[in-house]
Amino acid sequence: MKQKMQCFKWMLLLTIGFFVETSAQKVHNPIVWADIPDMSMVRVGDTYYMSSTTMHMNPGVPIMRSKNLVDWEIVSYAYDILGTIDDFEMANVKNAYGGGTWASSIRYHNDTFYVSIFSNNSNLNYLFYTKDPAKTP
């Protein structure tokens, strides 16, 4: 009898858990209707920030924010134009298509946000920083 009672308690707890779970807000994929490769995230207080690869497109490396990991908004970009080399300017029969920047990383330390990236075309690493990620570059 004791074993049956224990089994009943577990079934009751699982059933209650099921109803609690199903009463929560349902979210469907994709959450963001966009191509957001190589995302990097950091949480500061009650807000999440995310950066992403933009490859050859400018402005580059969007900075997004969310309070709930479901509703995202783009608040700025890490840069307007990465540089003036021939690849980026499409000069001398060159272009940055499929190149540009990849695999950004966003971090927060001592009241400052940092975004680091690498560019395949310039073979350089870049570090952008700001106190307010909603500011434009």
Image (cartoon, rainbow, N blue to C red):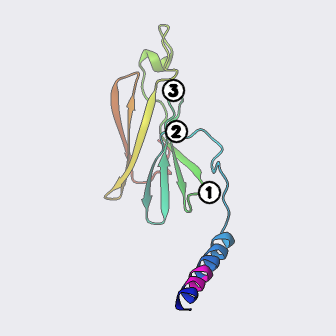
Among all residues in the image, which is located at the extreme bottom? 1
Q: Which badge, 3 or 2, is on the more N-terminal residue?
A: 2
Residue 50 picture location, percent across and down: 49, 49
State which region is magenta: 7-12
Instruction: Quadrant for residue 86, please give it.
Output: top left
Q: Which residue: 67% across, 54% down? A: 28
In this rendered view, identify the residue nearer to me: 132 or 27: 27
Instruction: Quadrant for residue 25, please give it.
Output: bottom right
- The amino acid pointed to by label 1 is Asp
Q: Which residue is mark 2?
A: 37
Q: Which residue: 53% across, 54% down? A: 65
In this rendered view, identify the residue nearer to me: 22 or 126: 22
Residue 128 included in the magenta stretch of the image: no
- The amino acid pointed to by label 2 is Pro
Which type of secondary structure does the marked residue at label 3 adopt? loop
Residue 8 included in the magenta stretch of the image: yes
Indicate which disc residue 125 carries.
none
